[in-house]
Amino acid sequence: MNRPQSLYPALEQALLCPDVEEKLALAEAARRDWLAGALPRLDAPAPYSLPEAGRPARPELVHPAKVPRRGLSTPHGHAALLHAIAHIEFNAVNLALDAAWRFREMPDDFVGDWLQVAAEEAKHFRLLQRRLLDLGFAYGDFPAHDGLWAMSRRTDNDALARMALVPRVLEARGLDVTPGIQRRLARIGDDASVAVLDVILREEVGHVRIGNRWFCELCRQRGLEPQAAFRGLLEAYAMPHRPGQYNLAAREAAGFFADELQALAALDDSSAAIDN
């Protein structure tokens, strides 16, 4: 496939590409070319609503409630858990590409940040894909849902809403649940996957920090108080915080405010939780 010589066509090509390996390669090439100064921000047709980014025919997408939940006591259950995480990482590649492609009023640093995220999410997917292959499975072998991309559609008209609700809510939730998943995998002796999740967790803290940075910058530009603006967006999009397990240390490292962390600590039931 011929690669475009300017930024927005290159990002659109990667976003729409349905082939997994080619999409990953295009995302990684976009970051390399951007850093090398080989992808200028030339005028291009305006971004448009994208009901679905390019993806392969499999996995089958189903309603989140219909995604099978399997315990780790069987090979299928073990692989299904890793597949679910791999699917999140694949969608995260598209989300990062979309942020850089869609929000053209943002500065070069924003583009560079989200191209870094896209390349790192591609790396995460490859790590998980390798673990699936080690277990005798492949990406696409289990059904999945499109909850992450659905939020992309809901926030495609406002960079502030996107930065609030994808990095600060959905991706931050990944910081919360990863330690518990690691403990479950460790109990069945899957140290290789635990190590993969160590890499992913460390870099996802950086991704959420990038989202926090740009959320706060957009609030500054619009004269908004960040915590009040965030609470307003949670209410507007019907995404309130609920009791659960919160990785407060990771959230602090990712740039959440002290007041937010205190409020989440009051909702944190980690001390009473029992991992399945």
Image (cartoon, grey):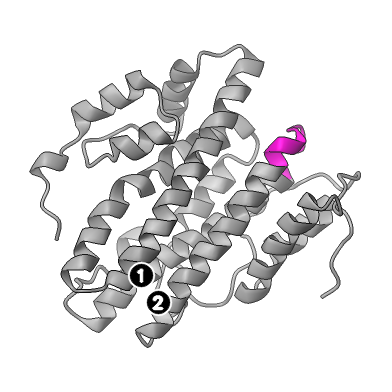
Q: Is residue 206 left or right of residue 191?
A: right
Element on which disc 1 rests: helix
Quickly name the residue at label 1. 82
Residue at 15% across / 56% down in the picture?
Answer: 275
Q: Is residue 146 above or below residue 247?
A: below
User: Does 172 appear in magenta?
Assistant: no
**Secondary structure category for the residue under label 2:** helix
Mark 1 belongs to which amino acid?
Answer: Leu
The residue tagged 2 is: 131
Check the picture and name the quadrant holding the N terminus: bottom right
Circle 1/circle 2 CB separation < 8 Å: yes
- Image quadrant holding the C terminus, namely bottom left
Indicate left or right for 232 with 99 as reference: left
| Range of residues picked out in magenta | 102-111
Foreground: disc 1 or disc 2: 2
- Using residue 74 as the reference point, say whether residue 44 is left or right of it: right
Looking at the image, residue 3 lies above or below residue 242? below
Which image quadrant for residue 86? bottom left
Measured from the top left, where is residue 94 in percent x and y?
Answer: 60, 57
Q: Within 10 angstroms of label 1, few (less than 14), some, or many (20 or more) residues?
A: some
Q: Amino acid at mark 2?
A: Arg
Q: Position of residue 109 (x, y in %)?
A: 71, 36
